Image (tube, helix red, strand yellow):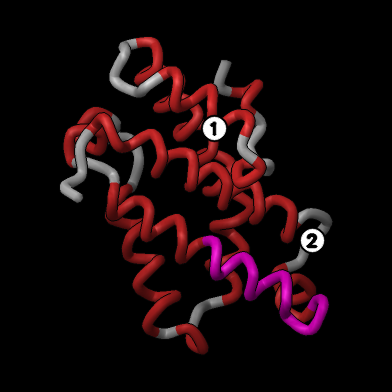
Amino acid sequence: MQPSLKTDLVYCLRILEAIGKINLYATGYDDPFVFFEANDQKDFNACLLQLLHIGEQVSRISEETKSSYVNIPWQTIKALRNIVAHDYVGVDKLIVFVTITEHIPVFKVDMEHIIQTELKQGNFNQTEYDMSKQSNFYRHIDFTNIE
């Protein structure tokens, strides 16, 4: 399927779901090395998987949407996905931690803003959005931040 503005809602929601999971897995860690070692590296590895997933969803978002929101570093997000996917063992723990603690919260707000704006403009399907709010798949999204 060719990316288009009309199909971007699902990709934006998937990104927000992944961010919600990252927040769940990384909560309570103030030190990147403690985070890396915690739970036999399960939390760190779970976050890496979600970062990979975010990069995949970013690659599916249409150029129309990306060009409307040039403040978001789309290429950098995709590049991080490629590093995680192709150099898994060599991923820098500190970069991952900074990404999770500093960049992901900003990206979350950006994604919520995109959904909110595109819904208001009628570019995203309101019925599809409303159905998504009822879906168990999106249980890690705080929809009140969008409305």
Earlier sequence position, callout 2 versus callout 1: 2
* Above/below status of 35 relative to 54: below
Taking the image as shown, residue 86 lies to the left or right of residue 38, namely left
- Crowding near the residue tagged with mark 1, few <14, some 14–19, many ≥20 C-alpha atoms within 10 Å: some
Q: Which amino acid does label 2 sit on?
A: Tyr
Taking the image as shown, residue 85 lies to the left or right of residue 89, namely left
Q: Name the dominant secondary structure of the magenta segment.
A: helix
Of residues 70 and 85, which is closer to you in this image?
85
The residue labelled by disc 1 is: 132
Of residues 37 and 137, which is closer to you in this image?
137
Q: Position of residue 100 (x, y in %)?
A: 60, 56
Q: Quadrant of residue 108?
A: top right
Segment tinted magenta in the rendering? 38-50
Q: Residue furthest bottom?
A: 89
Residue ID at (48%, 83%): 88
Q: In which quarter of the image is residue 124?
A: top left
Residue ID at (18%, 33%): 64
Q: Where is residue 120 in the image (x, y as percent from the top left)?
A: 39, 11
Q: What element carries label 2?
A: loop
